[in-house]
Image: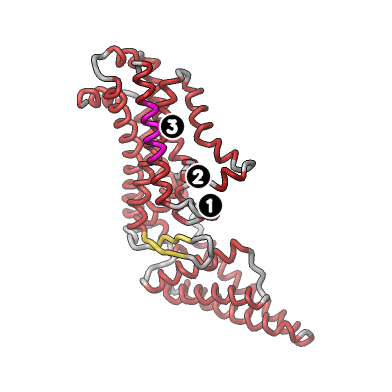
């Protein structure tokens, strides 16, 4: 097995395309950080509060005039006055970098919005209500733990940027990297004739496949680890390490159903489920490649098998009802961790994702073994 892995590794490292993928991954981290630094919207966010304070002051003046003729508008005037006072205090706190006061006032403002909704003076949509509850929980945690909000620039700090970057590349860039990697290796094997050579070796075909899978999965996961580490290092060099206890919010189906984790607790869970996704996709593509020689068809069939349940769920309600049984509904890791996936189906949670991905990986692996014994070739 060691000799096979060594052989596969040398063959792998000899490919310029595989090295190019590593370089591209690093450039993606650097490029993304450069973009969020160059197009820094923190000043725009601060300006938003200043504009909002001015608009609320004008609204107060208008409502004071209206109240003289329509006493029923008195409640709206009282709430608007409170909003104006709160936002004015927030502007002052931002200018002084007094983030505890800013957070305290933001919590007060969001609670006032919910109160206005209950009184019927502030119409809110369902998503706005969810966001308000989430923001209240987030800002309360930040306030109690003496942490700064994102408007203070925390998203450009070490671990905070690593968290942001990893959620950004999932699932689409991550899946593209894995498929590109595996299919490119399989393609190079066919062009170089190494697959025929491997079939002629006096090794168990199962051992050969195992060596390939170890390399494919290991390399893809290594890319994720290196991107995580690089994003942390770059952001730390420019803006400090950040805080590993920065909150990560999970919101259930009910807006009030909120639980708070931290980046330090989120990161191992993210890496583990990413490893499960890599394993499943690698096994799937490898299985299909043993059945079909044309790489474009391999890619097409892989995507069809992977994505067709998601497409059919738009037309077949039964698939949506049992969406937890299909891996594609777990691939958006960001929605899985935030709780947004549970809005589609309450069973789309992290634990079920692990069971589903591991279960399908095992099934695909068994089919791969069966096909190897049937064909006697890889």
Q: Does residue 90 appear left or right of residue 187 in this picture?
A: right
Query: Where's residue 369, x and y in %?
Result: 35, 25
Q: Looking at the image, is 144 positioned above or below residue 134?
A: below
Q: Residue furthest right?
A: 69
Task: Please name which of the two marks, 1 or 3, marks the residue nearer to the observer.
Answer: 1
- Residue 367 magenta: yes
Q: How is the image coloured?
A: secondary structure
Residue 9 in the image, given as x and y percentages of width and height: 27, 26
* Predominant secondary structure, magenta span: helix
Upstream in sequence: badge 1 or badge 3: 3
Magenta segment: does it hold 106? no
C-alpha gap between disc 1 and disc 3: 27 Å
Asked if disc 2 and disc 1 are in contact, CB closer than 8 Å, the reply is yes
Reading the chain from its start, which is encountered first: label 3 or label 2? 3
Query: What residue is pinned by disc 3?
Result: 179
Determine crowd level at label 2: few under 14, some 14-19, many 20+ residues with C-alpha closer than 10 A: many
Q: Which residue is mark 2?
A: 329
- Choose between 182 and 255: the one closer to the eye: 255
Q: Position of residue 45 (x, y in %)?
A: 53, 63
Residue shown at the point (44%, 66%) measured from the top left: 149
User: In the rendered view, does 7 fall on the left or right side of 336?
Assistant: left
Which badge, 2 or 1, comes first in the chain's sequence?
A: 2
Q: Secondary structure at mark 3?
A: helix
Residue drawn at (50%, 23%) of the image: 296
- Which stretch appears magenta? 359-368
**Res. 217 image quadrant:** top left
Name the spot of residue 130 as percent of width and height, x first: 55, 64
Image side of residue 174 versus residue 245, left or right: right
Quadrant of the drawing holding the C terminus: top left
């Amino acid at each position: 097995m060691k000799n096979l892995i060594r052989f596969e590794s040398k063959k792998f490292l000899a490919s310029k395309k595989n090295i190019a993928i590593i370089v591209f991954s690093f450039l993606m981290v650097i490029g993304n950080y450069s973009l969020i630094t160059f197009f820094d919207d923190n000043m725009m966010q601060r300006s938003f509060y200043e504009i909002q304070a001015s608009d609320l002051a004008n609204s107060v003046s208008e409502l004071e005039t209206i109240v003289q003729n329509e006493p029923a508008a008195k409640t709206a005037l009282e709430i608007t006055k409170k909003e104006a006072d709160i936002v004015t205090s927030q502007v002052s706190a931002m200018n002084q970098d007094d983030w505890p006061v800013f957070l305290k006032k933001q919590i007060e403002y969001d609670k006032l919005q919910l109160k206005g909704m209950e009184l019927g003076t502030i119409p809110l949509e369902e998503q706005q209500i969810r966001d308000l509850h989430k923001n209240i929980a987030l800002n309360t945690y930040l306030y109690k733990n003496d942490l700064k909000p994102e408007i203070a620039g925390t998203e450009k700090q070490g671990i905070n940027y690593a968290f942001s970057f990893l959620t950004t590349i999932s699932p689409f860039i991550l899946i593209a990297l894995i498929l590109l990697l595996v299919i490119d290796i399989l393609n190079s094997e066919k062009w170089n004739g190494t697959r025929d050579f491997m079939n002629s070796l006096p090794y168990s075909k199962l051992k050969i496949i195992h060596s390939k899978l170890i390399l494919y999965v290991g390399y893809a996961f290594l890319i994720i680890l290196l991107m995580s580490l690089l994003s942390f290092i770059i952001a730390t060099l420019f803006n400090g390490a950040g805080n590993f206890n920065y909150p990560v919010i999970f919101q259930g189906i009910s807006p009030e159903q909120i639980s708070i984790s931290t980046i330090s607790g989120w990161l191992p869970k993210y890496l583990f489920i990413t490893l499960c996704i890599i394993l499943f996709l690698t096994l799937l593509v490898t299985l299909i490649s043993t059945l079909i020689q044309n790489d474009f068809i391999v890619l097409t069939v892989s995507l069809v098998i992977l994505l067709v349940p998601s497409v059919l769920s738009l037309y077949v309600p039964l698939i949506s009802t049992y969406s937890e049984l299909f891996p594609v509904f777990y691939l958006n890791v960001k929605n899985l961790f935030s709780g947004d996936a549970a809005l589609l189906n309450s069973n789309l949670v992290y634990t079920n994702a692990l069971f589903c991905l591991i279960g399908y990986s095992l099934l695909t692996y068994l089919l791969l073994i069966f096909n190897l014994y049937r064909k006697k070739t890889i």
